[in-house]
Amino acid sequence: MLTFLARRILIAIPTIVLISIFVFGMQKLLPGDPVLVMAGEERNPEVIEFLREKYRLNDPIPVQYATWVGNAVQGDLGISLRTQQPVLDLIAEKLPVTIQLAVMALIIALTIGIPAGVLSAYKKGTWVDWLANIVALSGLSIPNFWLGIMLILLVSVNLGWLPASGYRPLADDFWLSLKTMLMPAFVLGTALAATLMRHTRSAMLGVLQSDYVRTARAKGMSENKVLVKHALRNALVPIVTVTTLLFGELLAGAVLTEQIFTIPGFGKLIVDAVFNRDYAVVQGIVLCTGVAFIAMNILADAAYRILNPRMNE
């Protein structure tokens, strides 16, 4: 396993380098000049020149890239042009909010998706199977922003059950934090539940037709034990792999949901940074997101090998 992980990390290094080149190059193509924004309405030439020298924007682009990468390797992702805070501190402040949202959404997705997939596979060809597939298709088709707005209108405005927006840290008020995160987590979780349901159904259909399942039934084992102990246990291998990758997507894909529910997380940070032309923040966030995706892929491969030891042979 250690050899496998070392090999995967070595393979990931060139990918991270390509991501860094892409991130740095794309921000140079973005319209507007952040220095002009920082200089204010007067745009004093001396101030503009001072800012360009301060942030080394007069250096050749290869030198700027080398400086940025060298600092990033040491944990310095630059300074926010707008707030003058270190980018790493901003990410460390906002990332836990998105992680909480992603974990809650994943719990909802697992709670809905896996049981629905198992039931759909077990009742293949019946109305239960058709209903589960229709619900899954709806979950994949309904846009997150529309579902979020409808939930705010129904649950918050009309019924008054949950807060419409905002965020409260878990350390300040645990239950209020869960309440404020429940609707956005449900919005994200329903789409993931649909994906998990389809993968679970596919995996269960293959396992239910295997010889050891037929043998377990022939021995008189109850259907519940057959489904849980034999079928679901062996079908979990691809499900765990998909779940690991979906968690990575959640961390990067919560942008619209965080905007709708005014959650000060990772997604809202990058949207604000783009609108404010805060390129250092944009670079840092995209780089961290790319590295997180690579890490989740490595974790998914490792989980697959743990659950399926034959891969280590």
Image (cartoon, rainbow, N blue to C red):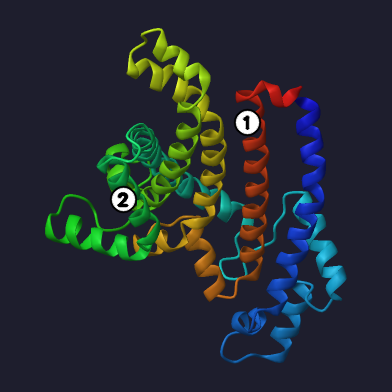
Q: Quadrant of residue 23?
A: bottom right
Q: How crowded is mark 1: few (under 14 residues within 10 Å), some or many (20 or more)?
A: some
Residue 86 visible in the shown view: no
Residue 263 has which mark? Answer: none
Kindly give the residue lying farthest to the left in the view shown: 159
Kindly give the residue lying farthest to the top in the view shown: 219
- Residue 264 position, x and y percent, is 43, 57
- Residue at (63%, 90%) from the top-left corner? 43
Mark nearest the camera among 1 and 2 is 2
Q: In which quarter of the image is residue 40?
A: bottom right
Query: In the rendered image of this protein, does residue 115 appear above or below residue 230?
Result: below
Query: In the rendered image of this protein, does residue 276 appear above or below residue 163?
Result: below
Quadrant location of the C terminus in the rendered image: top right
- Residue 190 position, x and y percent, is 36, 49
In the rendered image, which residue does mark 1 sit on? Answer: 304
The residue type indicated by label 1 comes to Tyr
Q: Is residue 10 left or right of residue 125?
A: right
Quadrant location of the N terminus in the rendered image: top right
Q: Quadrant of residue 256?
A: bottom left
Residue 147 visible in the shown view: yes
In the rendered image, which residue does mark 2 sit on? Answer: 135
Q: How far apart are marks 1 and 2 (CA)?
A: 28 Å
- Residue 213 position, x and y percent, is 46, 19
Q: Is residue 233 left or right of residue 71?
A: left
The residue type indicated by label 2 comes to Val
Instruction: Give SS at disc 2.
Output: helix
